Image (spheres, grey):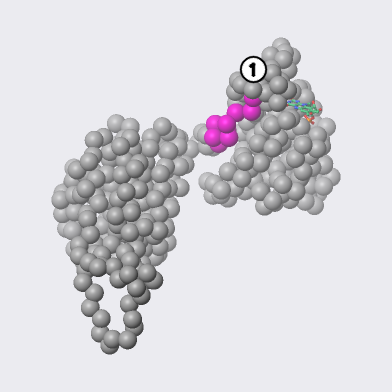
Amino acid sequence: MRGRKIIVGVTGGIACYKAVSLVSALRQQDFKVQVVLTENAAKFVTPVTFRAVSRQPVCTAEFAAGGEPVPHIGLVEDAALFVIAPATANTIAKLANGLADNILTASFLAARCPKIIVPSMNTAMWENPLTQENLQKLQKHGVEIIEPAAGYLACGASGAGRYPDTKIILQKIQETLGFAAKLRGKKIIITGGGTREPLDPVRVLTNNSSGQMGLALQDAAEKAGADVVYIDAAALDVQGLKEKIAAAFADADALIMAAAVSDYRAVQVSRNKIKSAPKKLTIELAKTEDLLKYFAGQKKKQYLVGFALESEDLLKNAEQKLREKKLDLIAANDISALSSAEATVILLDKSGVAETLERLPKTQIAARIIERVAAAVQA
Ligand SMILES: Cc1cc2nc3c(=O)[nH]c(=O)nc-3n(C[C@H](O)[C@H](O)[C@H](O)COP(=O)(O)O)c2cc1C
């Protein structure tokens, strides 16, 4: 999905300001977002705001689309999707009749990509048979309509016509682009990064985990529609990590422990900074709690995924860890995976079947792990 271009058309309704959140959320999902405003939309929210959140020049008038020779055509040529949010009754009527009298309506007519519109207006305008006929006509021609919500409206009335939650629009966009929301309604806890055990007020015992795998898993799970609780271990010691997981665990459907959890902690954390004077320093370490084992003991329905990073006997050690910790799936990494964007990973489940993912970017490995989790939690 990264880098795909989405056109966000914004028309002159009171809900215009909500389109700012939509643009921001799409940018955060790595889409390239091209905002197109009608002249009336620009009276509600200025192009400056949309330019800042989309990090792109905004098209506001037909002849000022970033130097494009034929702007309404150039705009849509490489678009993956065109969404109009909010869509006024006025623009809906124009679109339903094939009008192309401004940069937004002209580019919508010229676009061959999937199209979604998000009507938002006063209840009487929404219920007016003319608006409904216009929407049916658009639907008949393949345009997806997101039904407005009911509730308090800016005009003071209450009824249908409210701009829907941004999440609903994002979900529709993902579905339309073909991202099956396999984990919709599922809560997935993902940990990433390396824990930090304090030695004194300034020093910590940590490891070289970059946290990339955790973030790639978070991204893949969110794309699959999951409700993700991401816990960054780099800000926590083992006990702190345990508490964070425990707070989310009871109703979670899966726990994916990509965090590199310290095996040892200082027996005594020095209250003052340890002096650097002695030539040799001995710090007594004690084994930390095995969090995967602990949560395996707490498990009801949760699918547990662990990671094994080994420098030798990768498969043998992973098998042992899977069994001992009562995991459902283990991702065994070669040590070369540490701090690298790529990895070779063997996925091993309780049935004993091993799936090897040979030198792949961590994003692809994460996507495969999420597929396996989705298949298991849906079953
Ligand atoms: C304060 C205010 C709020 C408006 N809110 C809406 C609205 O939510 N939905 C709508 O369809 N029209 C709304 N309108 C009317 C549109 O702005 C008007 O129909 C305009 O021509 C739409 O232009 P456009 O579709 O080219 O952006 C509103 C007008 C004003 C002055």
Could you say which quadrant of the image residue 157 lies in? top right
Residue at image location 25% in from the left, 65% down from the top: 265
What amino acid is found at the position of numbered circle 1 in the picture? Gly
The location of residue 244, given as percent across then percent down, is 35, 48
- The residue furthest top is 129
Q: Which residue is mark 1?
A: 159
The location of residue 121, given as percent across then percent down, is 70, 23
Image vertical order of residue 118 relative to residue 281, above or below: above
Whether residue 70 is visible, yes or no, is: yes
Image vertical order of residue 226 relative to residue 13, above or below: below
Ligand 1 falls in which quarter?
Answer: top right
Whether residue 106 is visible, yes or no, is: no
The location of residue 153, given as percent across then percent down, is 67, 23
Image vertical order of residue 345 relative to residue 94, above or below: below
Residue at image location 34% in from the left, 43% down from the top: 247
Highlighted range, magenta? 162-170
| Residue 49 among magenta residues | no
Could you say which quadrant of the image residue 254 lies in? top left
Position of residue 232 in the picture relative to residue 305 (left or right): right
Q: Quadrant of the C terminus?
A: top left
